[in-house]
Amino acid sequence: MKGFIFTNFIDFVEKSFGLEMVDKMIYNSDLKSKGVYSAFNSYDFSELQSMLTYVCSKSGMESKIALEEFGKFVFPYLIGKHSYIIERYKDPLELIAGIESHIHMEVKKLYEDAELPTFSVVEKTKNQLGIIYQSKRGLTYFAIGLMKATLSHFNVKGNVSVDESFGGQENNAIKFTLTV
């Protein structure tokens, strides 16, 4: 997993819970990297899992909520660094529908070794978008946070619903339906 996720997670924890929580999280999470990350390098996903588990156990926050909030937190970083991609879109559903065919292609140009989830559009109308999300990492709620932040970015009220039973455990597929 790319280091910018780790650096942003540490920033998220600091802004949400304070620097003391960051220090304790890094010290108690048994991280191979020792909590030192570079945005462009890759790190083992298990380190993010360890830090998330620690923060949730100490804060009492459910991991789903923490991941969703983290997704919302990361969105401004992504659009700040890659505004040339976002500027192409005038509508949140169009942007989200373009994740696989446009955004992930741009990400691969920058980070050849990035291991990205897949987003397949299965239905699209003016006010609704159905997407199948597949990821071996199970960051469903991080993706939800990014989608909700996308709606907010475009000043659009909407809803993201999740059908976790859609694809079953064997293919790690989730169906999102966004309604605006």
Image: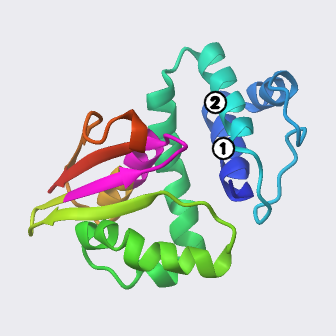
State whether residue 117 is above or below residue 52: below
Tell me the amino acid under the disc marked 1.
Phe
Q: Residue tagged by mark 2?
A: 52
State whether residue 125 is above or below residue 17: below
| Residue 172 in view of the camera | no
Q: Is residue 13 left or right of residue 21?
A: left
| Residues at marks 1 and 2 touching, judged by CB atoms closer than 8 Å | yes
Q: Can you say which quadrant of the picture contains the C terminus? A: bottom left
Q: Is residue 25 left or right of residue 166?
A: right
Rendered location of residue 32, percent (x, y):
88, 38
Residue under the point 66% across and 43% down: 9
Rendered location of residue 118, percent (x, y):
43, 60
Q: Residue tagged by mark 1?
A: 9
Magenta stretch encompasses residue 112: no
Mark 1 vs mark 2, foreground winner is 2
| Residue 12 in view of the camera | yes
Magenta stretch encompasses residue 140: yes
Tell me the amino acid under the disc marked 2.
Leu
Toward the viewer: 96 or 104? Answer: 104
Q: Residues within 10 Å of mark 2 (few under 14, many from 20)?
A: many
Residue under the point 48% across and 57% down: 117
Q: In which quarter of the view is residue 20 placed?
A: top right
Q: Could you tell me which secondary element the residue under label 1 belongs to?
A: helix
Rendered location of residue 54, percent (x, y):
69, 21
| Stretch of the chain drawn in magenta | 130-146
Q: Is residue 52 left or right of residue 100?
A: right
